[in-house]
Image (cartoon, rainbow, N blue to C red):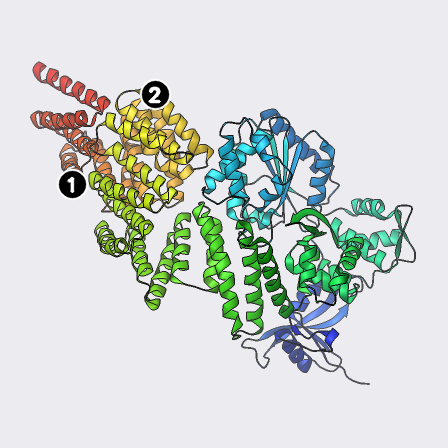
Amino acid sequence: RIGVRTGVNTGEVIAGDPAQGQAFATGDAVVVAQRLEANAGAGEILVGDSTFRLVRDAVSAEAVEPLVLKGKSAPVAAWRLLDVQPGVAGVMRRMDSPFVGRSPELARLGVELGRAKAERTCRVVTILGEPGVGKSRLAAELVASLGEEALVLEGRCLPYGSGITYWPLVEMVRGLDVAAALAGEPDGETVHGRILEAIGRAESRSRSDELYWAIRRLLEALARERPIVLVLDDIQWADRTFLDLVEYLSGWSRDAAVLVCCLARTEFAELRPAWPMLRLEPLSPDDSARLLENLAGPLQPAATRELGRATGGNPLFLEEMLRMLVEDGMLVERNGRLQPLTDVDLKRVPETVQAVLAARLDRLDAEELAVLQRAAVIGQVFWWGAVVDLSPATSMPEVARHLQALVRKGLIRPDERTFVGEDGFRFGHILSRDAAYDSTPKRLRAELHERFADWGEARVGDTVEFDEIIGHHLEQAHLNRAELAPSRPSGSALAARAAGRLARAGRRALTRGDASAATDLLRRAAALAPSAALLFDLAEAYGRLGSIVEAEERYGAALEAAVTAGDWRSEICARVELEVIALFRGEGGVDQLATAVQGALPAFEEAGDDRTVARLLTALADAYWWRCQIVPMQETLERALHHARRAADERLEADTAVRLAYGAVVGPLPVAEGRRLVAGAAAQAGEDTSAKGTLLLMAALLAALEGEVDEARDLSERGTEILDSLGRRIVLAAMSTWTSAVDLLAGDIDGAELQLRAALQQLIQFGQRANVASVAAQLAETLIAAGRNDEAASFITVSEGAATPDDLHAQIAWRVARAKVLADDDAREGERIAREAVELARKTDSPLFAAESLEALSIVLAAAGSRAEASSAAGQALSLFEAKGHLVAAARIRTIRAEARTASTQG
């Protein structure tokens, strides 16, 4: 007898094309298999760890000592195969609980839709389960049960990552007359324009929050006549921006019955654990048997049991197995039912889904498989013309016939979505596409990805959304080639093409305020072809996400790249941005930032780079803001506004105008003039609803300072509603110092405390250190007004700890609050701290900060018995409040002084 030694290992290999007589395979998986064979005894079979993990439930095996194999840096785990159990799945699927049927789940969806209709709200349900468990089928059953009762919109997230941010929206609105739906709606034209931006039919100008608002308004308009059921398939592929959109719709939709059904794989639960989940478990044996009867008619009990066991209760796997049996001739269609022609033999049927799909591919003829592989490279949805273009010239005439054959075999199906007039198809499910893609050699994958990118470029040119798709294919072409030949010269050119597409898409995302998508796209672009400019944009995207550490790292990399390349412009900008980040991290200073900006400005002014000049001036204005030097801040912003207009940068111009209005609130400009300035800025805000909301909050505080409490609360509510509708929660949290001040001036201490506590929690969560300091100090003042000094003291400590040395407002605010708390218990210490606040306020040109410091000083002096000094401080505070036009505070000081004079006379 011949003593056979066998080694088995699993993994990707570099293989020749058998059709061309290249019957070879190489790679790490092959090398390990050869080493296992060499270490096996006569008659033994050793399997690698990756193989054992795939077959562990179908074999008896014992672990051997980890093997030290030539060419491997670490010992390799191996298993000695003892026995194989025929017909047992290699990996048994988990059955956490029996699945009785889908009636309860369908009823749950009906209840959710009923609640949406009764409450006129948006309800979100995530149908969660493993691939093939029946998520799409459940959604289809819901849709079928509704008939004309609801408007059904469907969209699918592509498996390319976060690049195709709003692709589901493109599919949802296809076939809708959006303009007609919005006719007569308030802001209908604005909504329509932003929808066109989101789907790539207009230049991106709007931020993500503005696009969210427009999408919500469109759905609300569509839902006026009947409820909407929105089915979002493969939501696990969606990027964070699109997931945030779903949350926004759930939280902010008004007077619209909308049910959002998100279909996701099980791992999605880890991404958004708070979303309402409807988990689909595998079918029980009884339910599997009923499904088999529906699909194939009565089968022999043994075949039914074996099919149920082999598929583990997964409906899709059951369907795929049946299709394979039909292709094998074991089942035939008679009178609309599948009937067994012979005994069903499952020994030849693979034991896992991947094996099922791979076996189906193996049964295709070579030309059909080649067509399917080319389709798989394109994606789950693909186009006839693209497959033809990717095929060899001799095979092009036969592509149509092979596509129709693949439709008949159930691997693909026609798809209504077209691509510039092309007939579309889609794989029956993503697993079929993945199996076909995985069966494609990497060398061919690389070639096909590049060729499809060429095909797409020839047809869509610079179309916005397709930048991301074409960039993905060029990226995959490069990555596949790099794995096969890392030093190939053409790789750098391909990487540059991919990076160009991805970078352009990323910059567009950054322009519209979609920092999440921008970060993903720019990160991938920078990995392919890093440059100072690209790294700078990536850093900016991270900064907008609030990822300060990542932003600092990328600015550092941009600085290094700029120095190496001799790119002085990028070098200067990177140094300035690093100073800004250092300031926010509490590691830098205003002087360093101002010096960096002032040193950089002349070069860019001389070069005529108005956009960069405007940005640098805005950074310089931030330095003045931290020091509460409002007049030079506004002068600097006026210069920035001039350059932003010359650069025709509308967004930068709008942002600068809003910053100018900030100065009207705390600066020396009288309240009456400030209200006119804010009103003028609001009139010029155009369609920028976020700016309008922010300006309304400024107007509210100014009105409250003049004692116009009802008007102030109305303005505050309107501004808050606008920012709420846009999902600008962090902006509202940061501005809670102003909105709560309106409540305090209106006498609503409880309302002020409630919103400040919520804001502080949010700001701490998002690491907003500077705003934490200001809000904590304001919360302390609110608690002092409520007579709860002990509670106030703890928040004063929070403010003191968060305030950076250069943040003069926070440094003044916590001292003012602490002085008031100490007035009754330690007036002398309170006086010392109050005088520190007064001295700090003198470094600013804010009459409000100076007056508040002097008012605190007057309180502690009065408590210490220094009535003359207290009266003098109060008088100075009164003059400042009157000059600013803070009529409420001025009246308060007059009352306090009058009471003090009365007490002195009586004494």
In the image, 372 versus 157, the foreground residue is 372
Q: Is residue 89 visible?
A: no
Amino acid type at mark 2: Glu
Q: Is residue 18 above or below residue 288?
A: below
Q: Is residue 28 visible?
A: yes
Residue in the image at 71% along x and 30% along y: 148
Quadrant of the image for the N terminus? bottom right
Q: Which mark is residue 711?
A: 2
Q: Give whichever of 195, 588 is nearer the camera.
A: 195
User: Where in the figure is residue 55, as x and y percent of width and height?
Assistant: 71, 65
Q: Amino acid at mark 1?
A: Lys
Residue at (52%, 70%) from the top-left corner? 491
Q: Secondary structure at mark 2?
A: helix
Residue 117 against residue 627 in the figure, above or below: above
Q: What residue is rendered at 59% in x and 58% in y?
A: 458
Q: Which residue is mark 1?
A: 843
Residue 817, quarter of picture: top left
Tag 1's secondary structure? loop
Chain-order first, disc 1 or disc 2: 2
Residue 405: x and y in percent read 80, 57
Residue at figure coordinates x 63%, y 32% from the top left:
228
Query: Does 439 sit left or right of 900 as displayed?
Result: right
